[in-house]
Image: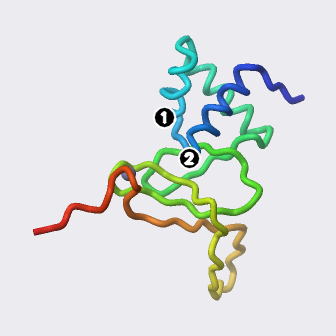
Amino acid sequence: MERMTRQRRALLAVLEEAGRPLTRGEWFRLAREYWPRLGTATLNRAIRDLTAEGRLIGVDFPGQKIRYELPSPSDHPHFICRGCGKVFDWDRPTPEVAIDIPAGFDVSGHEVLFYGRCPQCGPAPARK
Ligand SMILES: [Zn+2]
């Protein structure tokens, strides 16, 4: 049974407005701006249920806490800022990866990840 309470709609709206995958902590802080009485248990339950219902996708990047994003109709690459550590969704088709898969490996998917600096952080300071 699917249960979409007003709370959950509000939580998903916060995620959508952020426009990028959020960690549990980021999501909690943003949601509290609209909803000061939100508790962590409520968010945790919503994350568990929405993930089980396929309304939320957990994305796991190396060296990062798990982040959550809305299911996207198409595959898209991600970008990690080396300045602030934020992860961004790029609304672009994922580039094809041509690779000769070694024998014995059954590949079920792949991630395309770009690194660098986001517009807010600006270019890396020049090294002297
Ligand atoms: Zn940044």
Name which of mark 1 and mark 2 comes first in the sequence. Answer: 2
Image quarter hosting the N terminus: top right
Which dot marks residue 107? Answer: none
Amino acid, disc 1 = Glu
Which residue is label 2 attached to?
20
Q: Position of residue 102 (x, y in %)?
A: 63, 85
| Gap in angstroms between the C-alphas marked 1 and 2 | 11 Å
Q: Position of residue 38 (x, y in %)?
A: 57, 16
Q: Is residue 1 left or right of residue 28?
A: right
Q: Within the image, what quadrant is residue 97 found in?
A: bottom right
Q: Nearer the viewer, mark 1 or mark 2?
A: 2
Q: Is residue 93 left or right of residue 112?
A: right
Residue 82 lies, with reference to residue 58, above or below; the image says below
Residue drawn 69% across and 45% down?
70
Q: Within the image, what quadrant is residue 122 found in?
A: bottom left
Amino acid, disc 2 = Arg
Residue drawn 49% across and 60% down?
79
Element under disc 2:
loop
Few, some or many C-alpha atoms within 10 Å of disc 1 (few <14, some 14-19, many ≥20)?
some
Which residue is label 1 attached to?
26
Q: Nearer the viewer, residue 105 or 62?
A: 62
